[in-house]
Amino acid sequence: MVYESLPRTVRILLLGDPGVGKTSLILSLVTEEFTEHVPSKAEEITIPADVTPEQVPTNIVDICVAEQSPEQIVEEIEKSHVICIVFSVDRQETLSKIASHWLPFVRDNCHHDLRKPVILVGNKIDLIDYSIIDNIWDIAEEYPEVDRCIECSAKNLINVSEMFYNAQKAVLHPISPIYSIEEQE
Ligand code: GTP
């Protein structure tokens, strides 16, 4: 079995429906506080190696469906190493869209033998008092590229750094041989 060498930087892309909190998650990570009014799209952020748990420089990229074309989003998927698909735990339709749109969309735009790891992120857990992690796992079971599911809150800073750390780990310590290039040869 032949593996592609692991990248020296990790590029994390956040995808998901409008309003689920992608920009807020990035800004909460960087500023360690929640700001109610955020821009529609965060500037690309580079986190230096020495402040990441895995000691690898990490780029974090936001998307905004309203401002970017599908072609631009596909380009970002191609450039990324790991994709966090975010939904809002208080809006069932944003969870449904993960299986009906986002996971197939990512799959369609990754080479079959080079599937990128995906993290499913349920944001805004401050708004509910129950866990929906079992519903997420039901979706994840059909998509082996889903490395992990996590619930978090950009507002209360719950599991925010853990989400980005898990994304890094999914690239640097893949559970399955996602980077296998065996069948290309
Ligand atoms: P688009 O730019 O449309 O793609 O949205 P987005 O996914 O980047 O969402 P954004 O970060 O702009 O947040 C949307 C709204 O949700 C804002 O009013 C945020 O303040 C709010 N929000 C984000 N995260 C949380 C959270 O964890 N809890 C709560 N209660 N509100 C949140």
Image: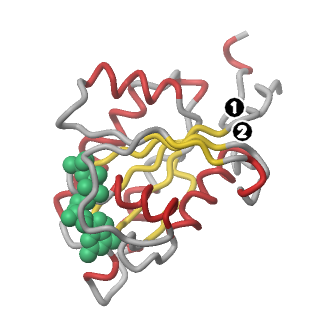
For label 2, the SS is loop
Which residue is drawn at the image coordinates 50% and 70% (left, top)?
32
Residue indicated by mark 1: 179
Residue at the spot 21% in from the left edge and 73% down from the top edge: 90
Numbered label attached to residue 95 = none
Observer able to see residue 43: yes
Q: Residue at x 74, y 20 (%)?
A: 182
Quarter-wise, where is residue 2 in the image?
Answer: top right
Residue matched to label 2: 177
- Toward the viewer: 139 or 41? 41
Outermost residue toward the top? Answer: 185
Position in image of residue 80 (x %, y %): 53, 32
Ligand 1 picture quarter:
bottom left
User: Do the numbered discs 1 and 2 sit on residues whose CB atoms are within 8 Å?
Assistant: yes
Q: Which residue occupies the foreground of this view, 67 or 133?
A: 67
Residue at the far right in the pictured view? 1
Q: Residue at x 52, y 43 (%)?
A: 45
